[in-house]
Image (cartoon, rainbow, N blue to C red):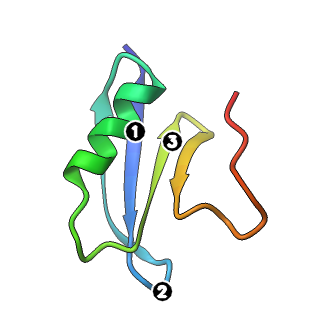
Amino acid sequence: MPNYEINYLHHDGSLACKFEAQCEDDTHAKVLAHAMKDHDHKGLEVWNGTSLVYQRPQPSGGPVCVD
């Protein structure tokens, strides 16, 4: 199972907290990230190694491309 890093962000974009988890795939990692999100956190990122696989809110330039 791949290791994922899940980052939660403050309103100013700085890192609030992060943790690592083993998930079966990107979808399971996204679901876990949302389930663990605190209402005080403005955004979140899900990384698989050096690849950003999910980000909320999306950047103003449009959706993040996920391979």
Position of 6 with respect to 53 (left or right) is left
Q: Nearer the viewer, mark 1 or mark 3?
A: 1
Disc ID at residue 13? none
Task: Look at 70% across and 52% down and name the residue there.
Answer: 63
Viewer-nearest residue: 58 or 22: 58
Label 2 – label 1 distance at C-alpha:
22 Å
Q: Secondary structure at mark 3?
A: strand
Count of numbered tags: 3
Mark 2 or mark 3: whose residue is earlier in sequence: 2
> Where does label 2 land, which residue?
12
- Residue type indicated by callout 1: Lys
Asked if residue 45 is positioned above or below residue 5 in the image, the reply reads: below
Q: Nearer the viewer, mark 2 or mark 1?
A: 1
Residue 56 percent location from the top left of the image: 50, 59
- Residue type indicated by callout 3: Trp
> Where does label 1 land, which residue?
30
Residue 17 percent location from the top left of the image: 30, 64
> Where does label 3 land, which residue?
47
